[in-house]
Amino acid sequence: MKVAGVPYRTLWMADDAVRVIDQSRLPFEFATVDLRSTADAARAIATMIVRGAPLIGATAAYGLALAVREDPSDFAIEAASRALLATRPTAHNLAWALDRMRAALAPVAPASRADAAFREAAAICDDDVAQCRAIGEHGAAILRRLARAATGRPLNVLTHCNAGWLACVDWGTALAPVYRAHDEGLALHVWVDETRPRNQGASLTAFELAAHGVPHTVIADNLGGHLMQRGRVDVVIVGSDRTTAAADVCNKVGTYLKALAAHDNGVPFYAALPASTIDWSIAGGEKIPIEERSARELTHLTGLTDGGGLATVRVVPVGSPVLNLAFDVTPARLVTGLITERGVCPATGEGLLGLYPERLSR
Amino acid sequence: MKVAGVPYRTLWMADDAVRVIDQSRLPFEFATVDLRSTADAARAIATMIVRGAPLIGATAAYGLALAVREDPSDFAIEAASRALLATRPTAHNLAWALDRMRAALAPVAPASRADAAFREAAAICDDDVAQCRAIGEHGAAILRRLARAATGRPLNVLTHCNAGWLACVDWGTALAPVYRAHDEGLALHVWVDETRPRNQGASLTAFELAAHGVPHTVIADNLGGHLMQRGRVDVVIVGSDRTTAAADVCNKVGTYLKALAAHDNGVPFYAALPASTIDWSIAGGEKIPIEERSARELTHLTGLTDGGGLATVRVVPVGSPVLNLAFDVTPARLVTGLITERGVCPATGEGLLGLYPERLSR
């Protein structure tokens, strides 16, 4: 996607470094960071310089390639995998990407592993782009269908957190259908949940949509239910950090509340995700580890001062404890459908197996 | 209630002025403001120096008394009432307090109206304190009953926004049962919703609870649903800005989402409110006017810098539009019960009439 007219992915090779957009500085500064080691990659994931389940996977793949460049031994690959896997506990794509990298490297002679690793990481990125593009096509068909009922006004899409191109390598998951439909000329408008505590909606989704010219409005996370009660939301689309085999959807904390409101008001609720997000080993979402992050994400906010600089302020009293859990699980019963690179399916185990029949034999 | 050991109400007479705590500066500064005219009172309500439905009513009553002191004519009383009524559209106590003041002043000769007006405003405040104390007694009985099931650990109460003593003259509505039960020795812990966009939870509820020594944890508004799914919330208690005759509960935006989550997880959900909050003229909550407030409440945040001063930062990109609606309506079907100064009733029209049978004859 484009930033100020220049096409970007969220990560790319620049000479011998892996260059990523520093998402912790958006929307007020557009800067890049070069990752030159596994430690750099692990730090970028843990501190959310990069974030979003697919991008976490892609960055981990390159993080492993950087390790292999230093030391192509099995021991080094295992050590780097463990370090990268420990950065974030919830997103499934992290484990998926590392598994794929190790499977690709295992049969390769150590002397050839560095080249193979960078090729495989690049393939993971290209696959993610292709999958997100396909998600966009399948999801745009849903938006076009819903738009026929919303004649004479733009279709109102609500999204939570950022599952746009910044969360992936390009295109996005939840926002891919929005970009696709918008580019095709469908009139739509996006309600952007601010997404406390890290404000990925206000800082990343709003930035993305503005850069691409998609009409949108930033709202407090608290407002979506009221808007649905008043008929001002036609469809909710979110991403997913991990989707279970029974189609429970783990995503940014607060997603479950929007799914409840959508269900209560008859608003369709979709999760858009590539297959790499699906954890076939877990049926029920209650088994997914929920990441606890720093209290400081809730107690402090960084933003622009009137003078144009950046400042950080504390908004919670010093003596008050804070709990910051980053994800929640939306039960499949509240999800209208899953949009994957292979199409749209009901949010059930059977629905997923219909799209991924190769899983039946396992 | 006490601040640093000193007992306070949220407003009181200081010589010839009405003195209020400036809640827009909490939790980082504890300061008071003197209101000397109706315009001062209207400004204090509109800019949320004072807020909370009962306190808005009390401040409006004194605002009218300040007008009467200048000019006791019927014309001046009507003009001041209109100005005060226009400050906030949603809280019912505002209209209720002004109606009560005018009814008290109508039969009084103009020369005696100033004294009568200040007496009536003081009576409104004293009545509010008595009502909140009674709400605390009735609600504490619920907490004691629930605590018997939560043996061996503190009872977990979740609240949204601030319906504590700062929202009233003293004691509070939703927090009155918490203070009462805590003072009686019941082990409890309060999950405090941050309450975007104005952060009344983080800045006022956390301040109040800390000042009174009640264990609590500040959370993002997005987290409550997950905590309920995991059995970490025993009861939700919120206030109400307007409750309809059919028991729909209008309260700070986001309340509806918590009610949905409570319903989905079998967690009791109570609204605590004095009778002055009940709008007997409306059955369904969809007729309540929902206040739209400044975009700046969402786009900017004020907090403490590392240096100890206050700073304001912008957290939404400059080009992104914002919608800031301040309230939503929780349908009665999601409310376990209403806690009023007369007791606890089911959230139904019949339930309310059971507590207020004098309304049957109208």
Image (tube, coloured by chain):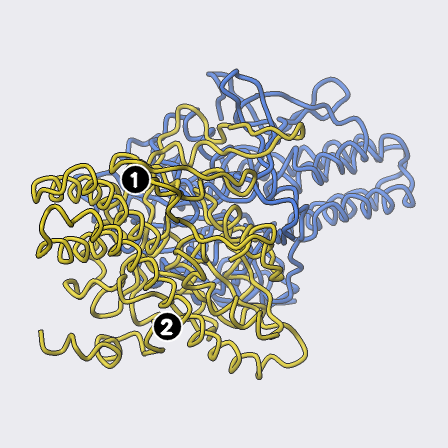
Chain colours: A yellow, B blue
| Residue to which mark 2 is pinned | A339
Q: Position of residue A319 (x, y in %)?
A: 39, 24
Residue B277 visible (yes or no)? no
Looking at the rendered structure, the kind of residue marked 1 is Ala
Which image quarter is the C terminus of chain A in? bottom left
| Residue to which mark 1 is pinned | A41
Subunit of label 2: A
Residue A227 lies left or right of residue A103; in this view the side is right
Say whether marks 2 and 1 touch (CB < 8 Å): no
Q: Position of residue B103 (x, y in %)?
A: 77, 48
Subunit of label 1: A
* Secondary structure beneath label 1: helix
Image quarter for residue A184?
Answer: bottom right
Residue B278 lies left or right of residue B215; in this view the side is right
Residue B306 lies left or right of residue A291; in this view the side is right
Q: Residue A333 or A90: which is nearer the viewer? A: A90
Looking at the rendered structure, the kind of residue marked 2 is Ile
Image quarter for residue A147?
Answer: bottom right
* Secondary structure beneath label 2: strand
Q: Residue A323 or B111: which is nearer the viewer? A: A323
Circle 2 residues within 10 Å: few <14, some 14–19, many ≥20: many
Residue A247 visible (yes or no)? yes
Residue drawn 58% across the image and 31% down it: B302
Q: Position of residue B168 (x, y in %)?
A: 57, 37
Q: Position of residue B270 (x, y in %)?
A: 42, 53
| Residues tagged by mark 2 and mark 1 found on one chain of the structure | yes
Q: Residue A104 bears which disc, if any? A: none
How many angstroms separate mark 2 from mark 1 (CA)? 29 Å
User: Which is nearer the N-term, disc 2 or disc 1?
Assistant: 1
